[in-house]
Image (spheres, rainbow, N blue to C red):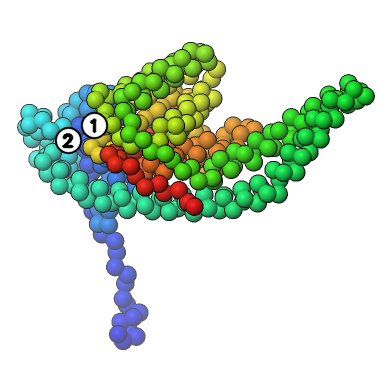
Amino acid sequence: MKNHDRETAQPVSDHRQTVRVGFVGGGKGCYELLKLFDSYRPKHLDVAIVGVADPVRDAIGRLYAEQHGIPVYDDLHQLLSCEVDLVIELTGNDDVLQEIFRSKAEKTKVLDHLGALFLWEIIAVLEEKIHLENRVSTLDTMSAVGEMAYSLTHRLRNPLMAAGGIVRKCMTRTDVPHSVRRRLKKVARALQEMEEVVSDICDVVRPLKPHFKLVDLNLFFEEFCKSAALESRFVHATFSCDIEENLPEVYIDPSLMRQALWHLLENCFEASPEGKAVIHLQVELCYDAILIQMRDEGPGFTSISPDLALHPFVTTRPGQMGMGLTLCRQIVLEHGGDMELSTASGKGVNVILKLPLHFTPPRSSSRA
């Protein structure tokens, strides 16, 4: 290229076409597509989601849209009254499809549920790619935390235990004045809290080594919901659940999954004003995965982002280490799934666990 050409050459502009997309049907297919567009940026299009129409207000796709600030409608005509370039029909109902064609603007294109089926294979590939990238990032973070925990364990745990033992022994001496014993009690409590901090860190970085068993998910969630409802009454909270019928038998580690769910439930209790916690658990089969949603009606995240809340040592509660959600996500990752948080100001936090269906014992991904 000549010098003159170099001087006058201009960079190629990014001519990305903006496409305003609306979804009719806020169920599982809508949820999968919204998640994809939320995490993946198309190379040649700017996709703007203008709304989701579904009369079922607790449909998983509609709930996800609402949590992410996407307009939701009870009637498809409300959606079609917006400026929409493409309507994706996901109900599988031919009558609904015909109503869309009758009511839409002339320039609006329609992708019916049969055409949408061709997207699922692409979605599955992209989701797997995104999942693996996120998993590598998470494992890198946990590896760094693990190195620190190793140092803390060997340099702090033994001296702390020794110091605590000496203090407690001194407290039992009859010649120690009451005022001194009272101060020693404070020291012992502080040492115990430090031991618990070290223990919490070790719980997160220690390989979990899950023991997978064939579990009837209907019985598993029935037992959990009974216990959760009972615990909720003790703390004057309201707990409700919506469990899809005829869930399959799959391989999970029931002890670890129960631990993860209890961590989430306790977080909901602590995040809500005393006596005003409202928690809802929803479980449903979503193609080749189980979706577990737990949401509360607390204040949501105000000082940190939902993604940051999953990182170790990040917490909004004084005196806490911020390990609970990290441990929950690690348990879900060990099952080959993923975990995400979403929140809307004043509308609480929505936690979604997505577990793949394992009909044979999966290989554990724990680090050695």
Q: Quadrant of residue 34?
A: top left
Three-letter amino acid code of the residue under disc 1: Gly
Task: Report whether 110 appears left or right of 323.
Answer: left
| Residue 143 can be seen, yes or no | yes
- For label 2, the residue is 90
Task: Report whether 71 appears left or right of 344.
Answer: left
Q: Can you give x and y, in whole percent of width and height, for residue 318 in the image?
A: 63, 32
Q: Which mark is residue 27?
A: 1
Q: Vertically, is 218 above or below 38? A: above
In the image, 349 versus 97, the foreground residue is: 349
In the image, 268 versus 14, the foreground residue is: 268
In the image, 159 versus 63, the foreground residue is: 159
Quadrant into which the N terminus falls: bottom left
Task: Report whether 325 appears left or right of 121.
Answer: right
What is the number of callouts on the image? 2
Q: How busy is the neighbourhood of tag 2: few (under 14 within 10 Å), some, or many (20 plus)?
A: many
CA separation in Å, label 2 and label 1: 8 Å
Label 2 with label 1: CB-CB less than 8 Å: yes
Q: Can you give x and y, in whole percent of width and height, for residue 285 in the image?
A: 26, 32
Residue positioned 27% across, 57% down in the render:
43
SS state under label 2: loop
Q: Residue furthest bottom?
A: 2
Three-letter amino acid code of the residue under disc 2: Leu
| Residue 74 can be seen, yes or no | no
Q: Quadrant of residue 184?
A: top right
Q: Can you give x and y, in whole percent of width and height, for residue 368 in the image?
A: 49, 52
Q: Quadrant of residue 198?
A: top right
Q: How busy is the neighbourhood of tag 1: few (under 14 within 10 Å), some, or many (20 plus)?
A: many
Residue positioned 45% across, 48% down in the render:
366
Residue positioned 29% across, 61% down in the render:
14
